[in-house]
Amino acid sequence: MNKELKVGIHRIEFSTPNNYLNLETLANAHNIDPAKYIYGIGQSKMAVPTPDEDTISIAANAAQDLLDSISPDDIKNISTLIFATESGVDQSKSGAAYLMGLIDMHSNCRAFELKQACYGGTAGVQMACDMVRTRPEESVLVVACDIARYQQDTPGECTQGAGAVAMLIAANPDVIEIDAERGFHSEDIMDFWRPNDFKHALVDGELSKDAYLNVMVDSYESYLTNGGQTLNNLDWLCFHQPFTKMAKKAYEHLSAIYPEQMQEKADTTYTISQQYGREIGNTYTASLYIGLLSLLDNADTDLTGQKIGFFSYGSGAVGEFFSGTVNKNYRKVTNKQGNQSKLANRQALSYDTYSQYMYQLREYNQPNQRYNVSSNANFRLAAINNNKRVYERVFNQMSRAA
């Protein structure tokens, strides 16, 4: 394996449902002070999927946007499609297989799904980097997507969200060159889990916060042992964001443990990466990389050549600390205006409509079900026939005009 070869994120796109719930609306429905959500956990909105949207349809929108941004020859060079999720739709058939039937991908491609809580997206990215280092003429499409959903009227409800990120991993990347040095930590912790027959995740909130911080430190120490950069040599930090306040806790934890490395860092080191997450909510496997897009789009300075430190966490638990360098071409190949329009043009929902979409009209093991067109996205779940999921590709007015 050629560790000297520059490998990383060559293209990156994201998608999120066109509807959201204002956290102030949720707080009023719960009869609590909205500040508990807006400032307490750092969220202002949560993305809400319609009944005909699921992880496959949301992922397909991001993946197709990426494929539309590259040439047919570049598409032919994709050897592997990796789909990362912890809210998958089938216990056997991978979400990647469903995507192969929806997006403009050739069939000479391996396709599979990865699962390890919120860490799955990073597992896919790092696996893809190693594949490309071995076969640099090939590239890998990594798609991370989740719908975060908790039982209604529980503390976790305010941290829900939905979204996807698609990333093309290739040699000589235009966006981020990912360093070969990485640090890991894994152990058995029951901080977050969802048994097979449960509709919603189960979580021990306080244990999960502690586990996140402890695993982060152990992963960073492993990263240093493997030749990584000290924190003072990292210009920016991107943390996994189950809610944006958790990134603040991570930053403060590192500052307390490594004061000599963090003393010159301003809050903007990590807060710019929170902006999109505050508007979308938790996206599990996609969360870290939506944070990356937020940083690339919203930093008021040219990031060329600057080093970003990443911490990825998946409950259960696995953590990884790694780093990358921003390429000079990143602004040419990222879509800041399009990304910001996706968020600005969404529709606010009433609490009653949100409740119907998230809890009353969503399918749970329905053997037969047809779905009205509620989404305005290019891909949707149309039906379940004899336990077989049926998806549609819909070209709306916006896509036709494009």
Image: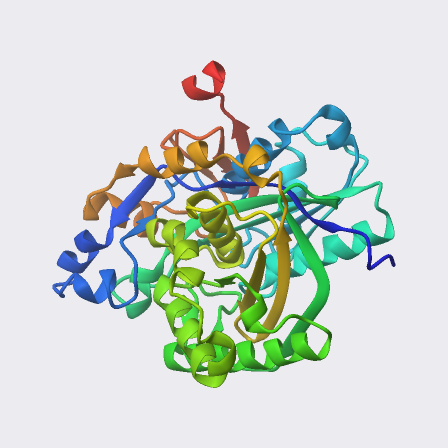
x, y (%) of residue 199? Answer: 43, 61
Looking at the picture, does residue 214 appear above or below residue 156?
A: below
> Farthest bottom residue?
257
Q: Who's the residue at 37% across and 62% down the image?
A: 244
Please count the marks in the image: 0
Q: Who's the residue at 72% across and 67% down the image?
A: 181
The quadrant in which residue 229 appears is bottom right
Residue 173 vs residue 338: left or right? right
Asked whether the viewer can see residue 366, the reply is no
x, y (%) of residue 308? Answer: 56, 59
The quadrant in which residue 69 appears is top right
In the image shown, does 279 or 116 lie closer to the viewer? 279
x, y (%) of residue 208? Answer: 44, 77
Q: How is the image coloured?
A: rainbow
> Farthest top residue?
401
Asked whether the viewer can see residue 275, the reply is yes
Looking at the picture, does residue 64 appear above or below residue 79?
A: above
Looking at the picture, does residue 384 appear above or below residue 245?
A: above
x, y (%) of residue 350? Answer: 19, 43
Q: Who's the residue at 57% across and 76% down the image?
A: 317
In the image shown, does 319 or 159 lie closer to the viewer? 319
Residue 348 vs residue 209: left or right? left
Instruction: Assign the N terminus to one quadrant of the image.
Output: bottom right
Looking at the picture, does residue 119 appear above or below residue 210?
A: above
Residue 19 vs residue 29: left or right? right
